[in-house]
Amino acid sequence: MISNKTIYLKLKLDFIQQKNHFFHSTDNKNFKAIGPDFNAEFGYWKGSRIALFSYNELNDGGSAAFNFFHYNYDGPK
């Protein structure tokens, strides 16, 4: 569970070694992995879709309020 008011999300894609991973951070410096590596294989991978949502494991309902969203693309140079 993350209780900070600000959270940073990162996706690292490595199509050569097929080791793609999601990360999160509360200080935008120290990122922790979310789940295991995953493959993005030709024919199945449709690209990452950016979305924010609320997920409640304890009971039905819940909410999340997002005041700010910034997308930073570090694509090929």
Image: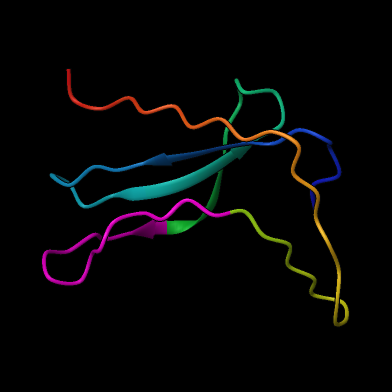
For the rendered model, the colour scheme is: rainbow
Q: Give the image location of residue 59, x and y in percent.
A: 88, 81
Quadrant position of the N terminus in the picture:
bottom right
Q: Give the image location of residue 62, x and y in percent.
A: 86, 68
State left or right for residue 23 relative to residue 54: left
Number of disc labels: 0
Q: Residue most toward the bottom?
A: 60
Residue visible at 79% across and 47% down in the picture: 2
- The answer to which of 6 and 51 lies nearer the viewer is 51
Q: Is residue 60 above or below residue 65?
A: below
Quadrant position of the C terminus in the picture:
top left
Q: Would you identify the image quadrant in which residue 48 lies?
A: bottom left
Residue visible at 47% across and 51% down in the picture: 50
| Secondary structure predominantly adopted by residues drawn in magenta | loop
State left or right for residue 63 relative to residue 27: right
State left or right for residue 6 relative to residue 72: right
Residue visible at 28% across and 49% down in the picture: 19
What segment is highlighted magenta in the picture?
Answer: 37-51
- The answer to which of 47 and 24 lies nearer the viewer is 47
Q: Residue most toward the front?
A: 67
State left or right for residue 33 relative to residue 74: right
Q: Is residue 33 above or below residue 37?
A: above
Residue visible at 57% across and 32% down in the picture: 31
Q: Is residue 19 above or below residue 59?
A: above
Q: Give the image location of residue 49, x and y in percent.
A: 41, 55
Q: Give the image location of residue 7, x and y in percent.
A: 70, 36
Q: Would you identify the image quadrant in which residue 26 lies?
A: top right
- The answer to which of 70 and 10 lies nearer the viewer is 70
In the rendered image, residue 19 lying in the magenta stretch gets the answer no
